[in-house]
Image: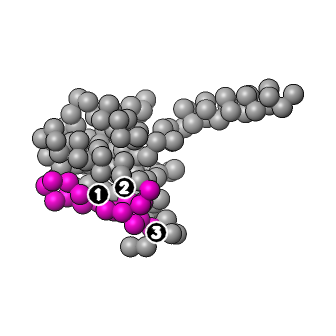
């Protein structure tokens, strides 16, 4: 799969043999998470990374920057994600959907976008600083 036009170029693999295609620039972070879950003994049965469409508006899956692990629906994983899901994701430079106000356990994405409210707050702070410094 060639990168470009939103296509993924990296592959993430779990010890169980589950694989997912992601963007090359996200491969290291996602592999970090998958390897950490493997070391903890969490059984990764399937993963969903790059796909041609997002299931929700502003999804990062079409860009290969999101990964779902054992997800059967929004905020539903089987088996349940370990209690340190957020800490593991953050230690690898990822955002866990479990940390959102409208939680989505089992969904992970490359840092830098963590939900509309937080994104808008950061954008507001940037504009306030930018205009204050322009005076």
Q: Are marks 3 and 2 in contact (CB under 8 Å)?
A: no
Which disc, if any, is residue 12?
Answer: 1
Q: Residue at x 84, y 32 (%)?
A: 134
**Residue 16: where, in percent of width, then height?**
13, 55
Q: Secondary structure at mark 1?
A: strand
Looking at marks 3 and 2 on the same chain, the residue that comes earlier in the sequence is marked by 3
Where 1 falls versus 25 (above or below)?
below
Left or right of residue 19: residue 102: right
Q: Are marks 2 and 1 in contact (CB under 8 Å)?
A: yes
Q: Is residue 8 magenta?
A: yes
Res 22 quadrant in image: bottom left
Q: Which residue is mark 2?
A: 27
Label 1: how many residues lie within 10 Å, few (<14), some (14-19) or many (20+)?
A: many
Number of numbered discs visible in the structure rendering: 3
Q: Residue at x 47, y 51 (%)?
A: 59
Left or right of residue 45: residue 3: right
Which disc, if any, is residue 3?
Answer: 3
Q: Is residue 66 magenta?
A: no
**Residue 60: where, in percent of width, then height?**
46, 52
Looking at marks 1 and 3 on the same chain, the residue that comes earlier in the sequence is marked by 3
Residue stretch in magenta: 7-25
Q: Secondary structure at mark 3?
A: loop
The quarter of the picture where the N terminus appears is: bottom left
Q: Residue at x 33, y 49 (%)?
A: 30
Res 46 quadrant in image: bottom left
Left or right of residue 126: residue 115: left
The quarter of the picture where the C terminus appears is: top right
Label 3: how many residues lie within 10 Å, few (<14), some (14-19) or many (20+)?
A: some
């Amino acid at each position: 799969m060639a990168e470009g036009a939103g296509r993924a170029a990296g592959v993430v693999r779990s010890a169980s043999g589950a694989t997912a295609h992601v963007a090359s620039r996200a491969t290291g972070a996602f592999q970090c998470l998958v390897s950490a879950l493997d070391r903890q003994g969490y059984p990764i049965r399937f993963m969903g990374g790059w796909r041609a469409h997002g299931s929700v508006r502003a999804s990062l899956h079409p860009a290969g920057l999101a990964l779902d692990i054992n997800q059967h629906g929004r905020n539903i994983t089987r088996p349940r994600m370990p209690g340190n899901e957020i800490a593991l994701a953050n230690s690898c430079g990822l955002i866990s959907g479990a940390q959102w106000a409208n939680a989505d356990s089992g969904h992970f994405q490359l840092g830098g976008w963590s939900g509309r409210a937080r994104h808008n707050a950061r954008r507001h702070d940037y504009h306030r600083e930018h205009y204050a410094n322009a005076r």
